[in-house]
Image: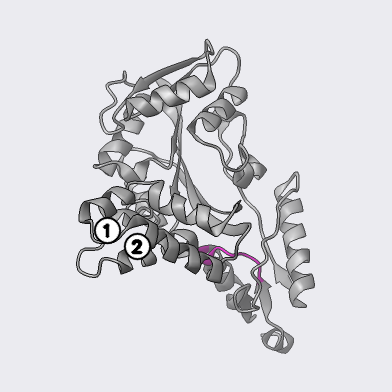
Amino acid sequence: MNPAAAASPLLIATFNPGKARELAALVEAAGYATRTLADAGIREPYEETGATYEENGGGKARHYARLSGLVTIADDSGIEVDALQGEPGVRSARYGGPGLDDAGRTRRLLEALPRDASLLATDLNLAMVEHARKAIGEDPRLSWRTADMCATELPDASFDALVCQFGLMFAPDKDAALREARRVLESGGTLLANVWDAIGNNRFAELANEVITGFFPTDPPTFYQVPFGLSDRPRMREMLRAAGFAEVRDEVLPLSSTSPSADELARGLVEGNPVVNEIQTRGTAPIQEIERKLADRIRTEMGDRPVPVRLQAIVFEAR
Protein backbone atom coordinates (compact mmCIF):
# COMPACT_ATOMS: atom_id res chain seq x y z
CA MET A 1 0.00 0.00 0.00
CA ASN A 2 1.20 3.51 -0.81
CA PRO A 3 1.93 5.20 2.59
CA ALA A 4 0.81 8.54 1.16
CA ALA A 5 -2.54 7.03 0.29
CA ALA A 6 -3.39 6.24 3.90
CA ALA A 7 -2.52 9.80 4.96
CA SER A 8 -4.49 11.50 2.18
CA PRO A 9 -8.06 10.21 1.83
CA LEU A 10 -9.81 10.44 -1.51
CA LEU A 11 -13.15 12.25 -1.64
CA ILE A 12 -16.02 10.29 -3.22
CA ALA A 13 -18.09 13.01 -4.90
CA THR A 14 -21.66 11.72 -4.84
CA PHE A 15 -24.71 12.29 -2.66
CA ASN A 16 -25.97 8.81 -3.58
CA PRO A 17 -25.11 6.53 -0.62
CA GLY A 18 -25.28 3.36 -2.72
CA LYS A 19 -22.91 4.71 -5.34
CA ALA A 20 -20.62 6.08 -2.60
CA ARG A 21 -20.37 2.61 -1.06
CA GLU A 22 -19.61 1.00 -4.43
CA LEU A 23 -16.88 3.52 -5.31
CA ALA A 24 -15.41 3.43 -1.81
CA ALA A 25 -15.11 -0.36 -1.95
CA LEU A 26 -13.13 -0.14 -5.19
CA VAL A 27 -10.86 2.64 -3.93
CA GLU A 28 -10.26 1.13 -0.50
CA ALA A 29 -9.38 -2.22 -2.09
CA ALA A 30 -6.46 -0.37 -3.71
CA GLY A 31 -5.25 0.81 -0.30
CA TYR A 32 -6.74 4.30 -0.14
CA ALA A 33 -8.83 5.79 2.63
CA THR A 34 -11.99 7.58 1.52
CA ARG A 35 -14.30 10.35 2.65
CA THR A 36 -17.82 11.18 1.51
CA LEU A 37 -19.26 14.62 0.85
CA ALA A 38 -21.17 14.30 4.13
CA ASP A 39 -17.91 13.51 5.96
CA ALA A 40 -16.43 16.70 4.50
CA GLY A 41 -19.50 18.74 5.52
CA ILE A 42 -20.36 19.54 1.91
CA ARG A 43 -24.01 19.86 0.91
CA GLU A 44 -23.72 22.04 -2.18
CA PRO A 45 -25.02 20.23 -5.30
CA TYR A 46 -23.13 20.36 -8.58
CA GLU A 47 -25.15 21.26 -11.67
CA GLU A 48 -24.35 18.79 -14.43
CA THR A 49 -24.46 20.79 -17.67
CA GLY A 50 -21.85 18.93 -19.72
CA ALA A 51 -22.52 17.44 -23.13
CA THR A 52 -20.83 14.12 -22.24
CA TYR A 53 -20.50 11.84 -19.23
CA GLU A 54 -16.78 12.68 -19.15
CA GLU A 55 -17.45 16.43 -18.98
CA ASN A 56 -19.92 16.01 -16.12
CA GLY A 57 -17.72 13.62 -14.15
CA GLY A 58 -14.63 15.76 -14.61
CA GLY A 59 -16.44 18.98 -13.77
CA LYS A 60 -17.92 17.43 -10.66
CA ALA A 61 -14.50 16.14 -9.50
CA ARG A 62 -12.86 19.56 -9.99
CA HIS A 63 -15.74 21.36 -8.26
CA TYR A 64 -15.61 19.25 -5.09
CA ALA A 65 -11.82 19.14 -5.08
CA ARG A 66 -11.82 22.95 -4.87
CA LEU A 67 -14.37 22.89 -2.04
CA SER A 68 -12.65 20.17 -0.01
CA GLY A 69 -8.95 20.48 -0.82
CA LEU A 70 -8.90 16.70 -1.38
CA VAL A 71 -8.14 14.58 -4.41
CA THR A 72 -11.63 13.75 -5.67
CA ILE A 73 -13.25 10.91 -7.59
CA ALA A 74 -16.51 11.52 -9.45
CA ASP A 75 -18.49 9.88 -12.23
CA ASP A 76 -21.52 10.43 -14.39
CA SER A 77 -23.88 7.99 -16.05
CA GLY A 78 -27.34 7.85 -17.53
CA ILE A 79 -30.05 5.79 -19.13
CA GLU A 80 -29.99 5.43 -22.94
CA VAL A 81 -33.17 4.14 -24.57
CA ASP A 82 -32.91 2.81 -28.13
CA ALA A 83 -36.59 3.56 -28.78
CA LEU A 84 -35.87 7.24 -28.05
CA GLN A 85 -32.68 7.36 -30.12
CA GLY A 86 -30.43 7.14 -27.10
CA GLU A 87 -32.33 9.66 -24.99
CA PRO A 88 -32.18 10.77 -22.23
CA GLY A 89 -28.49 9.75 -22.01
CA VAL A 90 -26.26 12.37 -20.43
CA ARG A 91 -29.36 14.45 -19.68
CA SER A 92 -31.06 11.70 -17.66
CA ALA A 93 -31.26 13.82 -14.50
CA ARG A 94 -32.67 16.80 -16.44
CA TYR A 95 -34.76 15.10 -19.10
CA GLY A 96 -37.91 17.05 -19.82
CA GLY A 97 -36.98 19.81 -17.38
CA PRO A 98 -38.04 20.31 -13.74
CA GLY A 99 -41.60 20.36 -12.47
CA LEU A 100 -43.30 18.49 -15.30
CA ASP A 101 -46.76 17.05 -14.71
CA ASP A 102 -48.28 14.13 -16.64
CA ALA A 103 -49.24 16.45 -19.49
CA GLY A 104 -45.76 17.91 -19.71
CA ARG A 105 -44.10 14.50 -19.73
CA THR A 106 -46.47 13.27 -22.43
CA ARG A 107 -45.75 16.34 -24.53
CA ARG A 108 -42.02 15.75 -24.11
CA LEU A 109 -42.41 12.17 -25.32
CA LEU A 110 -44.38 13.35 -28.33
CA GLU A 111 -41.58 15.73 -29.24
CA ALA A 112 -39.08 12.86 -29.08
CA LEU A 113 -41.12 10.47 -31.23
CA PRO A 114 -40.63 10.09 -34.99
CA ARG A 115 -43.51 11.39 -37.13
CA ASP A 116 -44.66 7.89 -38.05
CA ALA A 117 -44.73 6.70 -34.42
CA SER A 118 -47.75 6.61 -32.11
CA LEU A 119 -48.19 7.07 -28.38
CA LEU A 120 -50.89 5.67 -26.09
CA ALA A 121 -51.20 7.55 -22.78
CA THR A 122 -53.03 5.81 -19.94
CA ASP A 123 -54.04 6.30 -16.34
CA LEU A 124 -56.28 4.32 -14.01
CA ASN A 125 -58.30 7.44 -13.23
CA LEU A 126 -60.56 8.81 -15.98
CA ALA A 127 -60.41 12.33 -14.51
CA MET A 128 -56.60 12.30 -14.82
CA VAL A 129 -56.83 11.13 -18.43
CA GLU A 130 -59.29 13.92 -19.29
CA HIS A 131 -57.16 16.54 -17.53
CA ALA A 132 -54.06 15.50 -19.49
CA ARG A 133 -56.00 15.30 -22.76
CA LYS A 134 -57.16 18.91 -22.37
CA ALA A 135 -53.68 20.10 -21.38
CA ILE A 136 -51.97 18.38 -24.34
CA GLY A 137 -54.46 19.11 -27.07
CA GLU A 138 -54.97 17.10 -30.22
CA ASP A 139 -52.18 15.19 -31.93
CA PRO A 140 -52.82 12.49 -34.56
CA ARG A 141 -50.07 10.31 -33.07
CA LEU A 142 -51.58 10.36 -29.57
CA SER A 143 -54.50 8.36 -28.15
CA TRP A 144 -55.86 8.14 -24.60
CA ARG A 145 -57.57 5.51 -22.45
CA THR A 146 -57.98 4.36 -18.89
CA ALA A 147 -56.04 1.20 -18.03
CA ASP A 148 -55.17 -0.92 -15.01
CA MET A 149 -51.43 -1.60 -15.20
CA CYS A 150 -52.00 -5.07 -13.72
CA ALA A 151 -54.49 -6.00 -16.48
CA THR A 152 -54.39 -3.52 -19.37
CA GLU A 153 -56.55 -5.53 -21.82
CA LEU A 154 -54.11 -4.50 -24.57
CA PRO A 155 -52.93 -6.97 -27.25
CA ASP A 156 -49.81 -9.06 -26.77
CA ALA A 157 -46.54 -7.67 -28.19
CA SER A 158 -48.21 -4.45 -29.33
CA PHE A 159 -45.64 -1.85 -28.18
CA ASP A 160 -41.90 -1.38 -28.68
CA ALA A 161 -41.49 0.87 -25.61
CA LEU A 162 -43.35 1.42 -22.36
CA VAL A 163 -42.75 4.28 -19.90
CA CYS A 164 -44.05 4.15 -16.31
CA GLN A 165 -43.63 7.44 -14.44
CA PHE A 166 -43.79 7.00 -10.63
CA GLY A 167 -46.66 4.54 -10.96
CA LEU A 168 -45.38 1.09 -10.14
CA MET A 169 -45.26 1.78 -6.38
CA PHE A 170 -49.06 2.11 -6.36
CA ALA A 171 -49.87 -1.13 -8.19
CA PRO A 172 -51.73 -3.53 -5.86
CA ASP A 173 -49.81 -6.45 -7.43
CA LYS A 174 -46.43 -5.18 -8.57
CA ASP A 175 -45.30 -8.54 -9.96
CA ALA A 176 -48.47 -8.73 -12.06
CA ALA A 177 -47.87 -5.19 -13.34
CA LEU A 178 -44.35 -6.09 -14.46
CA ARG A 179 -45.56 -9.30 -16.14
CA GLU A 180 -48.22 -7.25 -17.93
CA ALA A 181 -45.57 -4.80 -19.12
CA ARG A 182 -43.51 -7.67 -20.52
CA ARG A 183 -46.62 -9.17 -22.21
CA VAL A 184 -47.59 -6.03 -24.14
CA LEU A 185 -44.01 -5.30 -25.26
CA GLU A 186 -42.60 -6.72 -28.46
CA SER A 187 -39.58 -9.02 -28.25
CA GLY A 188 -36.66 -6.76 -27.37
CA GLY A 189 -38.99 -3.92 -26.38
CA THR A 190 -37.94 -1.51 -23.63
CA LEU A 191 -39.55 -0.76 -20.28
CA LEU A 192 -38.41 2.51 -18.72
CA ALA A 193 -39.79 2.95 -15.19
CA ASN A 194 -38.87 5.23 -12.33
CA VAL A 195 -39.57 4.95 -8.61
CA TRP A 196 -38.62 7.05 -5.60
CA ASP A 197 -35.43 6.16 -3.80
CA ALA A 198 -35.64 5.46 -0.05
CA ILE A 199 -37.49 8.05 1.99
CA GLY A 200 -34.28 8.68 3.94
CA ASN A 201 -32.78 10.01 0.70
CA ASN A 202 -35.78 12.32 0.21
CA ARG A 203 -35.74 14.43 3.35
CA PHE A 204 -38.73 16.56 2.29
CA ALA A 205 -40.97 13.47 2.40
CA GLU A 206 -39.31 11.97 5.47
CA LEU A 207 -39.93 15.23 7.32
CA ALA A 208 -43.58 15.29 6.25
CA ASN A 209 -44.05 11.71 7.43
CA GLU A 210 -42.41 12.44 10.79
CA VAL A 211 -44.63 15.45 11.47
CA ILE A 212 -47.88 13.87 10.25
CA THR A 213 -47.45 10.57 12.10
CA GLY A 214 -46.45 12.50 15.23
CA PHE A 215 -50.03 13.75 15.52
CA PHE A 216 -51.37 10.17 15.58
CA PRO A 217 -49.27 8.12 18.04
CA THR A 218 -51.65 5.13 18.14
CA ASP A 219 -52.93 5.01 14.55
CA PRO A 220 -50.54 6.92 12.25
CA PRO A 221 -51.32 7.46 8.55
CA THR A 222 -49.25 5.10 6.42
CA PHE A 223 -49.45 6.69 2.96
CA TYR A 224 -45.83 7.86 2.86
CA GLN A 225 -44.66 4.26 3.15
CA VAL A 226 -46.15 3.53 -0.29
CA PRO A 227 -44.34 5.87 -2.73
CA PHE A 228 -40.94 4.97 -1.24
CA GLY A 229 -41.54 1.25 -0.96
CA LEU A 230 -39.66 0.10 -4.09
CA SER A 231 -36.22 1.56 -3.41
CA ASP A 232 -34.49 -1.81 -2.95
CA ARG A 233 -32.59 -1.95 -6.25
CA PRO A 234 -31.50 -5.63 -6.08
CA ARG A 235 -35.07 -6.66 -5.26
CA MET A 236 -36.43 -4.62 -8.16
CA ARG A 237 -33.92 -6.20 -10.54
CA GLU A 238 -35.03 -9.65 -9.35
CA MET A 239 -38.70 -8.72 -9.87
CA LEU A 240 -38.02 -7.50 -13.40
CA ARG A 241 -36.11 -10.65 -14.33
CA ALA A 242 -38.84 -12.83 -12.83
CA ALA A 243 -41.35 -10.98 -15.02
CA GLY A 244 -39.41 -12.02 -18.13
CA PHE A 245 -36.95 -9.19 -18.72
CA ALA A 246 -33.48 -10.55 -19.58
CA GLU A 247 -31.52 -7.28 -19.43
CA VAL A 248 -31.99 -4.87 -16.52
CA ARG A 249 -30.13 -1.65 -15.76
CA ASP A 250 -30.79 0.96 -13.11
CA GLU A 251 -29.53 4.43 -12.30
CA VAL A 252 -29.96 6.53 -9.16
CA LEU A 253 -30.77 10.13 -10.05
CA PRO A 254 -30.28 12.84 -7.42
CA LEU A 255 -32.13 16.02 -8.39
CA SER A 256 -32.44 19.55 -7.04
CA SER A 257 -35.59 21.63 -7.00
CA THR A 258 -37.10 24.55 -5.10
CA SER A 259 -40.40 25.45 -3.51
CA PRO A 260 -41.47 29.10 -3.27
CA SER A 261 -41.95 28.90 0.49
CA ALA A 262 -42.10 26.57 3.47
CA ASP A 263 -45.84 27.20 3.81
CA GLU A 264 -46.54 26.15 0.21
CA LEU A 265 -44.33 23.08 0.44
CA ALA A 266 -46.02 22.00 3.68
CA ARG A 267 -49.47 22.40 2.15
CA GLY A 268 -48.48 20.36 -0.89
CA LEU A 269 -46.99 17.57 1.23
CA VAL A 270 -50.20 17.32 3.27
CA GLU A 271 -53.01 18.19 0.86
CA GLY A 272 -51.38 17.18 -2.42
CA ASN A 273 -51.65 13.43 -1.99
CA PRO A 274 -53.92 10.79 -0.38
CA VAL A 275 -52.43 11.27 3.10
CA VAL A 276 -54.94 14.10 3.54
CA ASN A 277 -57.76 11.53 3.33
CA GLU A 278 -56.17 9.48 6.12
CA ILE A 279 -55.88 12.61 8.28
CA GLN A 280 -59.51 13.60 7.66
CA THR A 281 -60.74 10.06 8.36
CA ARG A 282 -59.10 10.04 11.78
CA GLY A 283 -60.48 13.51 12.54
CA THR A 284 -58.33 14.13 15.61
CA ALA A 285 -55.87 16.70 14.28
CA PRO A 286 -56.71 19.82 12.21
CA ILE A 287 -55.00 19.86 8.83
CA GLN A 288 -54.00 23.50 9.30
CA GLU A 289 -52.23 22.69 12.57
CA ILE A 290 -50.29 19.86 10.92
CA GLU A 291 -49.29 22.15 8.06
CA ARG A 292 -48.13 24.89 10.43
CA LYS A 293 -45.90 22.50 12.35
CA LEU A 294 -44.53 21.00 9.14
CA ALA A 295 -43.80 24.46 7.71
CA ASP A 296 -41.90 25.36 10.89
CA ARG A 297 -39.80 22.18 10.60
CA ILE A 298 -39.12 22.91 6.94
CA ARG A 299 -37.94 26.45 7.75
CA THR A 300 -35.66 25.16 10.47
CA GLU A 301 -34.12 22.29 8.51
CA MET A 302 -34.36 23.32 4.86
CA GLY A 303 -34.83 27.09 4.66
CA ASP A 304 -37.51 29.38 3.27
CA ARG A 305 -38.36 31.66 0.35
CA PRO A 306 -37.31 29.69 -1.58
CA VAL A 307 -36.85 26.24 -0.04
CA PRO A 308 -34.09 24.17 -1.69
CA VAL A 309 -35.34 20.60 -2.07
CA ARG A 310 -33.21 17.56 -2.81
CA LEU A 311 -35.02 14.64 -4.43
CA GLN A 312 -33.72 11.22 -5.39
CA ALA A 313 -35.26 8.68 -7.75
CA ILE A 314 -34.23 5.42 -9.41
CA VAL A 315 -34.74 4.73 -13.13
CA PHE A 316 -34.93 1.14 -14.37
CA GLU A 317 -34.42 0.15 -18.00
CA ALA A 318 -35.42 -3.42 -18.86
CA ARG A 319 -35.62 -5.46 -22.04
Task: Determine if the magenta segment contains residue 235.
Answer: no
Residue type pointed to by label 1: Pro
Tell me if mark 1 has few (under 14), some (14-19) or many (20+) residues whose alpha carbon lies within 10 angstroms of its own.
Answer: many
In depth, the one of 174 and 186 nearer the eye is 174
Residue that carries the numbered disc 1 in the rendered image: 221
Quadrant location of residue 304?
bottom right
Q: CA distance from mark 1 to mark 2?
A: 7 Å
Vertical relation: 61 (above or below) 38: above
Residue type pointed to by label 2: Ile
Asked whether the viewer can see residue 70, the reply is: no
In the image, residue 110 lies at what x, y percent?
57, 23
In the image, residue 69 lies at what x, y percent?
77, 78
Quadrant of image for the N terminus: bottom right
58 to the left or right of 259: right
Q: Secondary structure at mark 1?
A: loop
Residue shown at 38% from the left, 55% from the top: 228
Tell me if mark 2 has few (under 14), some (14-19) or many (20+) residues whose alpha carbon lies within 10 angstroms of its own.
Answer: many
85 to the left or right of 181: right
Quadrant of image for the C terminus: top left
Sequence-wise, the earlier of marks 1 and 2 is 2
Q: Which residues are magenta?
A: 12-18
In the image, residue 85 lies at what x, y percent?
62, 29
Residue shown at 32% from the left, 28% from the top: 183
In depth, the one of 29 and 117 nearer the eye is 117
Vertical relation: 203 (above or below) 144: below
Residue that carries the numbered disc 2 in the rendered image: 212
Number of numbered tags placed on the structure image: 2
Tell me whether the residue at label 1 lies in contact with that at label 2, contact meaning CB atoms closer than 8 angstroms. Answer: yes
Vertical relation: 101 (above or below) 130: below
Asked whether the viewer can see residue 156, the reply is: yes
Quadrant location of residue 117?
top right
